[in-house]
Image (cartoon, helix red, strand yellow):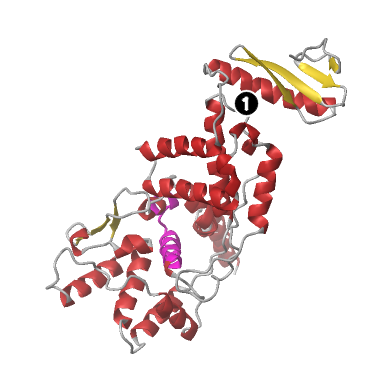
Amino acid sequence: MKNSATPGWTKTNVPNLYRHSNGRYYARIFVGGKEIWKSLKTTLKSVAEEKLQVLMGNARQQRSKGIKVAEGTITFAEAVEIYRQNFQRSVEIAEGTKRFQEAGIKRIFKTWPEIGGLNIRKITVPMVREWALRVRSSATPHIPNGAHKPSRNSTGVSATTFNSALDALRHVLDIAVESGHLFVNPARDKSIKRGRQKTKRLLLPSRAQFMAVVKEIENAGCRDNMAASEMVRLLAYTGARQTEANNILWKDVNFSSGRITLRVTKNGEPRDVPMIFECRALLEKMRESRKDESLETPVLRLKECRGFLERACKNASAPRIGHHDLRHLFATTAIEAGIDIPTVAKIMGHKDGGALAMKVYGHLRDEHAQSAMSKVSFGLLDKEENGAKAKGKERK
């Protein structure tokens, strides 16, 4: 067992910090009554002291939780199963989030095939750092099902995709820390950073351009053009996601209350969307022409209309938009009409109270506020101007 008297080891003036004859610093700590020596992987004392403080903090946290150093070994794949069971059994995690976490796990195994059989104690910071670099450098553009070429602007690994894998890796290794198989989580080292999300610049059609796009689709003179027009307008009028709109049945449309119930949503929680005037008019016209349909019949007759949109935008000289852009168009139009961002976020199904909507559409709020502030007046200046005008008339 190593100690300060063992040849090659020198005790420093910092408690629990030792220096080896090779110049590297080591920490000597106790967890669960077991002595642990850990290399701090530096020959600089100042850096070693900083790393030692982190280790000591983790040790105190483990002691406060009653975590003991685990005996035996555990592979990464075994830790993954524990993690998977934990989030799959949780009733507080939305189904969409569970699918996202599962996708992160799959990406880890796809980009690091040998990790499954690794003893979890053998996973180090350099290994995780090298994996992160490999994931980003080896990415290939995504080719959608049925397509012949990659998606526009696809790099193969977006910040969201990379972060899902990194977050999954961190959570799995957290389990190893909590069970005492790891002392610190190598995936949480400050040198390993999450991908930065690029804020997409919204390029949306004006109201006049949008109506021109709708007219182009209606006058396309081909099969399903009217069904495509209905889908485009419903997505824009409700702010619903494509999947949410595809699952609207006639029984979900309540003309009495003026609301549409979205039963199938991203977070698995149904929500009601108020019908604006144009939405009600559209649905009433659709229902009148299809009044013999059962209430269990889907309102939309198409599942997608991307091709119609692309051609219509080109012919109408409007910005190119897709299904999800119509959701942005709804939010933009609502905010410009004076509806506050938290209300818009609630209608769109955001669960963050408007934080995401503020990030994406905040500039619209600022423009609206500037316009509104230009109308604020205390009346004093008006009185002074009127008085000056009156005196001018008297002089004349």
Residue at numbered disc 1: 183
Image spot of residue 73 (x, y percent) = 56, 28
180 to 108, vertically: above or below: above
Q: Which of these two is toward me, 14 or 254?
A: 14
State the quadrant of the N terminus.
Answer: top right
Asked if one can make out residue 144 in the rendered structure from this viewpoint, the answer is yes
**Residue 303 inside the magenta-drawn segment:** no
What kind of secondary structure does the magenta stretch mostly adopt? helix
Asked if one can make out residue 191 in the rendered structure from this viewpoint, the answer is no
**Where on the picture, by quarter, is residue 123?**
top right
Instruction: Judge the density around disc 1: few (<14), some (14-19), many (≥20) Cα neighbours within 10 Å.
Output: many
Image spot of residue 338 (x, y percent) = 42, 58
Type of the residue with mark 1: Phe
Image spot of residue 88 (x, y percent) = 38, 40
Q: Secondary structure at mark 1?
A: loop
308 to 355, vertically: above or below: below
Residue drawn at (62%, 23%) of the image: 58
Left or right? Give the position of 347 relative to 114: left
| Residue range (magenta) | 324-344
193 to 234, vertically: above or below: above
Residue drawn at (26%, 62%) of the image: 248
14 to 337, vertically: above or below: above
Q: Check the image and name the residue furthest to the top.
A: 5
**Where on the picture, by quarter, is residue 9?**
top right
**Residue 336 inside the magenta-drawn segment:** yes
